[in-house]
Image (cartoon, rainbow, N blue to C red):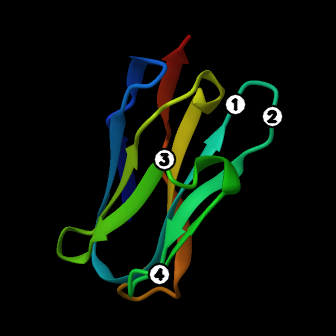
Amino acid sequence: QVQLVESGGGLVQAGGSLRLSCAASGIIFSINAMGWYRQAPGKQRELVADISKGGSTNYVDSVKGRFTISRDNAKNTVYLQMNSLKPEDTAVYYCNANVWAYGKAPTDYWGKGTLVTVSS
């Protein structure tokens, strides 16, 4: 069974930084795209950033220039470096990965989420 486990959330003041990590575990053959989504109270979940297996990245406009997504394929881990945080970045951040596990077709998996709170 594939699992995604996030870490690195917490409380930070506006202008501060946090680094989120998400590690995939299980009997994994390969991981295609990996990404970070977030859901603020009362809002729909939105894509924050994603990264292909080859390293191509995509960001929502509101985080461009402030957030950086990266991955370590050897560790099956994706990171989100968040700088210049704003109160509107407050949300639960979820990791997503399209994982090709042995004996299964590529499947999307989700982490349980990690809370990021930015105080003004």
Q: Amino acid at mark 1?
A: Ala
Dot 2: within a 10 Å radius of its alpha carbon, few (fewer than 14), some, or many (20 or more) residues?
A: few
Q: Nearer the viewer, mark 2 or mark 4?
A: 4
Which of the two labelled residues, at mark 3 and mark 2, occupies the earlier sequence position?
A: 2
Which of the two labelled residues, at mark 2 and mark 4, occupies the earlier sequence position?
A: 2
Residue 80 spot, x, y in % from top left:
39, 51
Q: Nearer the viewer, mark 3 or mark 1?
A: 3
The numbered disc on residue 43 is 2
Task: Measure the C-alpha gap from mark 3 to mark 2.
Answer: 21 Å
| Residue at numbered disc 1 | 40
Callout 2–callout 1 Cβ contact below 8 Å: yes
Q: Residue at x 60, y 32 (%)?
A: 89
Task: Measure the C-alpha gap from mark 3 to mark 1.
Answer: 18 Å
Q: Which of these two is toward me, 107 or 22? A: 22
The numbered disc on residue 5 is none
Q: Amino acid at mark 3?
A: Arg
Dot 4: within a 10 Å radius of its alpha carbon, few (fewer than 14), some, or many (20 or more) residues?
A: few
Question: In this image, 47 relative to 108: left or right?
Answer: right
Q: Quadrant of the N terminus?
A: bottom left
Q: Residue at x 46, y 50 (%)?
A: 67
